[in-house]
Image (cartoon, rainbow, N blue to C red):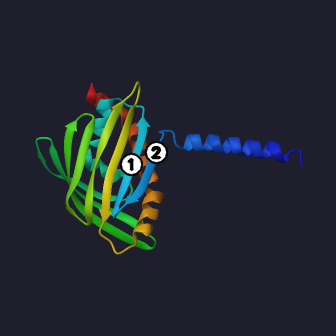
Amino acid sequence: MKWLFPLALVLLISHGYAQENINPYDVQVSTRLIDSHFQIQASYTVPINLCTAYAFITSYESAKNIPGILESKVISRAGNKVRVYRVIEEQILLFSIEMKSLVEYTEVSNRLLTFEQISGDTKFYKGSWRLISEKDSTTFKYESLVEPDSLIPSTVIEYFIKNSIRGRFELMAQRASQQRVAEMLACK
């Protein structure tokens, strides 16, 4: 019995340490249903400079490297507007759902990227990426509103969004960090 408390304490401390190591980029994600729209807010911090971070989020065709994105192709560029055709595959329950969209990105500055779906399989998709430069890192802040066009109940969709989106942002943070060396050379 004497060893039970120290063992529990060690397990709690090691669990906390493991949680810290699992999220090295301080990935924060929240989703909530507002009327028929899902509001998604996420952020993560990567040890790269602002130029490298901006190059990462505007490399639209590289998004194919994120699980669930089957295709990502720049269709046109005009001034600061970029149109990107995307095909995304989601796994909901036992069903594989493929969604296609044409999204227009507006490159506002090296700190802001806004986007809006022009056409596609969701009723509404609009949002932004904001970059906040800190001492030796950059924080990526994502915000969007999405209204699916689906017969699947919104509670089921919300459950799968909440359980899959964190992993995608964690992977994006990891990929941004890995891009660091190549992109930093381009930014000098």
| Residue at position x 55%, y 44% in the image | 22
Relative to 85, say whether 47 is above or below: above
Task: Tell me the number on the disc at residue 41.
Answer: 1
Q: Secondary structure at mark 1?
A: strand
Mark 1 in CB contact with mark 2 (< 8 angstroms): yes
| Residue at position x 48%, y 59% in the image | 163
Label 2: how many Cα within 10 Å (few below 14, some 14–19, many 20+): some
| Residue at position x 30%, y 43% in the image | 129
Most distant residue in the front direction: 35
Q: Amino acid at mark 2?
A: Gln
Q: Secondary structure at mark 2?
A: strand
Disc 1 from disc 2: Cα separation: 8 Å
Question: Is residue 185 left or right of 157 when viewed as pictured?
Answer: left
The mark nearer the N terminus, 1 or 2, is 2
Question: Is residue 75 left or right of 114 when viewed as pictured?
Answer: left
Q: Which percent across, then down, holds residue 37?
A: 33, 60
| Residue at position x 38%, y 70% in the image | 96
Task: Tell me the number on the disc at residue 28.
Answer: 2
